[in-house]
Amino acid sequence: MSNSSQPNDRLEQAVAILECGGIVAVPTETVYGLAANAHDADAIARIYKTKGRPAFNPLIAHASDLAMAQVIGEFDDLSLRLAETFWPGPLTLVVPILADTGIAPAVTAGLPTIALRHPLGSMAELAKRIGSPLAAPSANSSGKVSPTCARHVQDDLGNKVDLILDEGDCKVGVESTIVKVDDGKVVLLRAGGLPVEDIEAVVGPVHRSAGNPRIEAPGMMLSHYAPSSPIRLNANCLTDGEALLAFGAPLTRDAPQLNLSPSGDLKEAAHNLFSMIKQLDALNPLGIAVQPIPETGLGAAINDRLSRAAQGTR
Ligand code: TXA
Ligand code: MG
């Protein structure tokens, strides 16, 4: 599905805006990104400003394909194997950046590495049409939950962006998995839309990052994804005034609630996660109690985002 489902004239409009240094909200299979030409320093500066994003937190560059990514990053054998196996898809690879790429320095926030991804859909198509990677963080104000539909972007960033391409709901619903090959080992920097088990089936054991996550993946701050209502994890009862985010059989039916997946399907739960957090938060409950979610497969990414959301509201 490298072709997008956008009408051609909307894509052409997006191309024209990106070529003039504008910023466009573009869907991927994971979440919506806020995209600019990765070579355009002014446009990249505007992305940081629009999101209120700290300058030390680098962006992911989205390529039209592996060949475009290899013009910018140095791929060792393992990184190449991962790209060939999982691209296009919800996997970001952090690799050393090559010399003289012309990529705006702010994209990598001064790091000697760059995060690269070949996503599905319009983002890759636009990178192809402008002949340059698109730098794109998730299209939300810094510290907020990532958008999984055009309405989320509209509500948060609205007229601060030049165009929002609406392709409906993102299929995966959580951000990409980020890995880096270090000393011949694959290191997980962020759990995400590609289950670690799938990566391990191809390259063997994946190491959890031993370093400080603020340095390894600087955006992984504990206060990320903060809704306004306090979040309580692994709930096995409900207190007065709390709303329930259920998974599987609900704890109770006597409270405002949404169910991530009544059948206990982790893919469905990931797809619904951000949207349901936003919907429950909008009810202004005293808190949001979340039922336990298994740590396997996409559960790792779901639990990671939920625990950040819980930290952020403490
Ligand atoms: O699914 C996704 O990954 C979405 C879509 C739009 O592609 N993007 C996304 O971007 O989630 P963002 O900016 O919200 O998160 C990117 C993460 C941040 O935690 C950032 O610190 C990390 O990637 N990152 C970027 N470049 C890095 C690098 N060179 N080394 C380590 N971490 C890096
Ligand atoms: Mg983000």
Image (spheres, grey):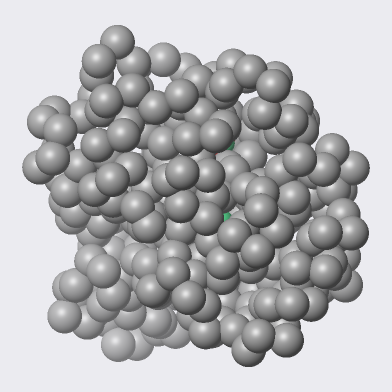
Q: Position of residue 309 (x, y in %)?
A: 51, 51
Instruction: Reply above or below: 63 against 287.
Output: above
Q: Position of residue 221 (x, y in %)?
A: 56, 34
Residue ID at (21%, 29%): 206
Q: Quadrant of ligand 1?
A: top right
Instruction: Reply above or below: 212 against 116.
Output: above
Quadrant of image for the C terminus: top right
Please tell me how many numbered marks the rendered image carries: 0
Pick the residue in front: 28 or 300: 28
Instruction: Reply above or below: 290 against 178.
Output: below
Pick the residue in front: 151 or 105: 105
Residue ID at (28%, 75%): 268
Residue ID at (36%, 33%): 179
Q: Position of residue 249 (x, y in %)?
A: 17, 79
Q: Is residue 236 left or right of residue 59?
A: left
Residue ID at (63%, 89%): 7
Q: Position of residue 229 (x, y in %)?
A: 58, 62
Q: Is residue 74 visible?
A: yes
Q: Is residue 44 left or right of residue 186?
A: right
Instruction: Reply above or below: 124 against 180.
Output: below
Q: Quadrant of residue 250?
A: bottom left
